[in-house]
Image: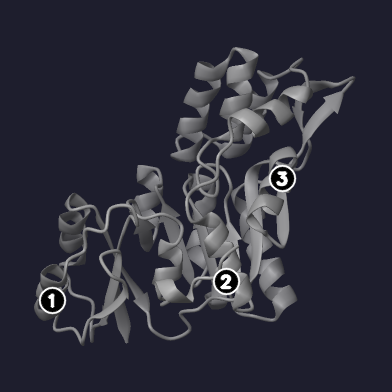
Amino acid sequence: MPVCVLTAAPERPVIEAPLVEAMRNAWGGGEARWLDRGVAAEFDVATVPDTLEDARAEMDAHGIDLNVVASEGRRKRLLLADMDSTMIRQECIDELAAEAGVGERVAAITARAMNGEVDFEGALRERVALLAGLEAAVIEKVLRERITMMPGGDVLVATMRANGAMAALVSGGFTAFTEVVAVRLGFDRHRANVLLIEGGRLTGHPGEPILGREAKVAALEELCAELGIAEEDALAVGDGANDLGMIARAGLGVALHAKPAVQAEARCRINHGDLTALLHLQGYRRDAFAQP
């Protein structure tokens, strides 16, 4: 039986009981359950109405995300997460570019690549080329001064791991960043591209092969095989077009504060909540969250 899940930002708990009851009645749903008062509620439905997208748009205007998930197998055993603009607030390559004085040029390419307007691999090579000659020590400076974690990420990872899941960070960014972010947030694994360095400076070339859309799908396949689970038992989350492959294949695929092209294709999307909304989608109550 499908489950309708309403979520909002924890700092803006706008979900009220009358609204939940009105939607439950309109959809012929079962009894409403609060996962976090004001922040997350859910109810079972026999069928998903044809008015789902209209209802989503209406809820979106109120700062509420509306998603429908399957009731069976809700708690996933693998978390596969993008890093840039998903587990962290920034795009690492844009932050490096800002330090190199080419921030606007690189950010424009990044935006087009994440919306699927240009080839990801070609766009990555083009952006890295603009960083040629940048001192490698700038990476540590960017990590220290510019990179911040997305709210709820550490709780998401801690809760899923406490309930037996593996957490893997799979990024189209760079290992110089994923190795630090993975430790900060408690991930079991991380995969990303390599920034080549010679003589203490970036060469302007990434290591090959480039980890893009297909490599993320391959990571999903490989980790599911390693764990002996089906892809239906995985949760994949990201914001860019290079995440769509794993989002489409995973049992629970979520577009988080994503680009328009990604939102249009993803089955679940979170535009208002933080990363703990992914726990509510799996049926976790707030009092069941693990502390990092």
At numbered mark 1, what does the secondary structure look like: helix, strand or loop?
Answer: helix
At numbered mark 3, what does the secondary structure look like: helix, strand or loop?
Answer: helix
Provide residue 139's location: percent of width, then percent of height: 72, 29
Please give the label number shown on residue 279: none
Provide residue 161's location: percent of width, then percent of height: 63, 71
Q: CA separation, marks 3 and 2?
A: 20 Å
Q: From the viewer's perspective, is 270 left or right of 17?
A: right
Please give the label number shown on residue 160: 2
Location of the N terminus by quadrant is bottom left
Q: Residue at x 49, y 60 (%)?
A: 247
Q: Residue at x 43, y 75 (%)?
A: 287
Q: CA separation, marks 3 and 1?
A: 44 Å
Amino acid, disc 2: Met
Q: Is residue 282 visible?
A: no
**Residue 209 against residue 12 in the figure, above or below:** above
The crowding category of the residue bearing disc 2, from other C-alpha atoms within 10 Å (few below 14, some 14 to 19, many at least 20), is many
Residues at marks 3 and 1 touching, judged by CB atoms closer than 8 Å: no
Q: Nearer the viewer, residue 67 or 163?
A: 163
Question: Which residue is under mark 1?
Answer: 21
The crowding category of the residue bearing disc 1, from other C-alpha atoms within 10 Å (few below 14, some 14 to 19, many at least 20), is some
Provide residue 5's location: percent of width, then percent of height: 30, 71
Q: Residue at x 41, y 47 (%)?
A: 258
- Whichever of labels 3 and 2 marks the residue nearer the N terminus, that label is 2
Q: Residue at x 40, y 75 (%)?
A: 285
Location of the C terminus by quadrant is bottom right
Residues at marks 3 and 2 touching, judged by CB atoms closer than 8 Å: no
Residue placed furthest toward the right:
199
Question: Which residue is under mark 3?
Answer: 180
Q: From the viewer's perspective, is 222 left or right of 2?
A: right
